[in-house]
Image (spheres, rainbow, N blue to C red):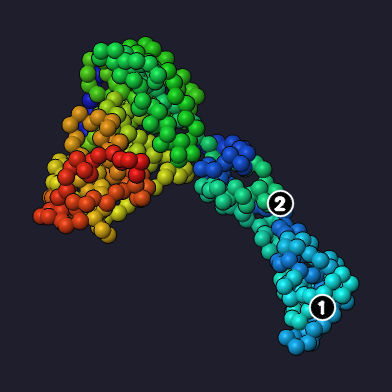
Amino acid sequence: MVRRRLASKPLAEVRETMRSTFPCPDRTIRVPVAGAAGRVTAGPVYSPLTVPATDIAARDGFAVMSSETLGAGSKTRVPLRNPHRVNTGNAIPPGCDAVVMIEDVIGRDGAWSTGKAVLPGEWIHPAGTEIRQGELILPAGHPIRPCDIGALLTYGITGVDVRDVKVGLIPTGSELVPAGGRPGPGQAIESNTAVAAALLGEAGAACTRYGIVRDDPRPLRQAIRRGIRENDLLLVSAGSSAGTRDFTAAVIGDLGEVLVHGIAMKPGEPAIIGRIDGKPVVGLPGYPIAALTAVRELALPLLAAWGFCPRPAERLRARLAGTVAAEPGYDEFVLLAVSRAGDRYIATPLPRGARTQMAAVRASAYLHVPAGTGSIRDGTEVEVLLTGPRWMIRESVESREPASGCRIREREAASPLKDGS
């Protein structure tokens, strides 16, 4: 096999190529409502029930005909001739059109009276106040939230049709051992596909992780054929570069077509975009942070274009505590440790080095430096994207008094949370 490397293409161009080349898979499945959180509705969902089905009491008290209470006041009590005891949510008996609250009634069985008049419909929820049969509950393309589950069940729905996409993940590398194993010299535990499955699963994809494939084009070809047959999108982890054991691009080319090999983004430049049987194949770099970046910046936008809903990253403004060096021709994604100084935020760029996974653990945000921007100087205020909830950002004691460039100690900002905070 002859291996060839295409020139790196701009990230925006690659994303547009993926959107225009790969149409959304037209498949839905029916899932139980109780387990549908995070899935996306395939079509509009209408109520089969009217809720409440009849007028119900909005307060504990007595259901009455409102005309019986005319003349009641602070100095005049009016006897209730035919009251019906009701609790909140009880159906209103026929012939009654209002509820007198229990605190406005005195007396005993057979001799109740009130000092407060009520109007027709007072303290009553009319039939259909919640929803009427045939009314829309959720539109098509709606990400189902926990509160939506409660409404669907309340309105008589136990199953819902949702969009379905199957994503296959193939780890490659003769040096890899499965999770739970103990790596020997030169070996590593496979984790890239687990991270990718977690990210894609949050967007509503059904992910299948396959077994590790050694660095050999024959078993890799078999694995990719199976992955394409069983999925709508296939991710192949590692083997995307130009080393002597990198076969992913060549195998994709043999089975289909390599559309892109090399993307002008860092990390993640060696990523591959291919097409086999009309389906997308993404070759991920082997370095964990480069693989994570490729999944986030390539696979997740494709799912979004297909109508799925990746979890949006929260954004905030922060001042850089250190210069970010970036090549003008690349989209760069720089990991940051963010700390809080009063009502301001300070972002310290983490060392890039060998791009170990601990850099991702220590990071609380990342900075997207668009192509053409170049380096960004220390002290510049930038918009960062958080990798977790904002409440996890700790306040830095040393950063309360900003020095030149708002510097803080890197080890303070970059350290993981301590003492359970």
Q: Position of residue 168 (x, y in %)?
A: 44, 27
Other-residue count near label 2 (Cα within 10 Å), few / some / many at <14 / 14–19 / ≥20: some
Q: Tell me what residue is drawn at x 31 percent, y 23 percent.
A: 238
Q: Mark 1 vs mark 2: which is more N-terminal?
A: 2
The C terminus appears in which quarter of the rendering? top left
Give the vertical position of 226 relative to 232 (above or below): above
Q: Is residue 397 left or right of residue 231?
A: left
Residue 328 vs residue 387, the one in the foreground:
387
Residue 228 vs residue 187, the one in the foreground:
187
Disc assigned to residue 113: 1
Give the vertical position of 228 relative to 360 (above or below): above
Between circles 1 and 2, the one closer to the viewer is 1
Q: Tell me what residue is drawn at x 29 percent, y 36 percent.
A: 360
Name which quarter of the figure residue 269 lies in.
Answer: top left
Q: Position of residue 140 (x, y in %)?
A: 55, 49
Q: Position of residue 330 (x, y in %)?
A: 20, 40
Disc assigned to residue 30: none
Give the vertical position of 333 relative to 212 (above or below): below
Asked whether residue 310 is in view, the answer is: yes
Asked whether residue 253 is in view, the answer is: no
Report the amino acid beneath label 2: Pro
The N terminus appears in which quarter of the rendering? top left
Report the amino acid beneath label 1: Ser
The residue identified by callout 2 is 48
Other-residue count near label 1 (Cα within 10 Å), few / some / many at <14 / 14–19 / ≥20: many
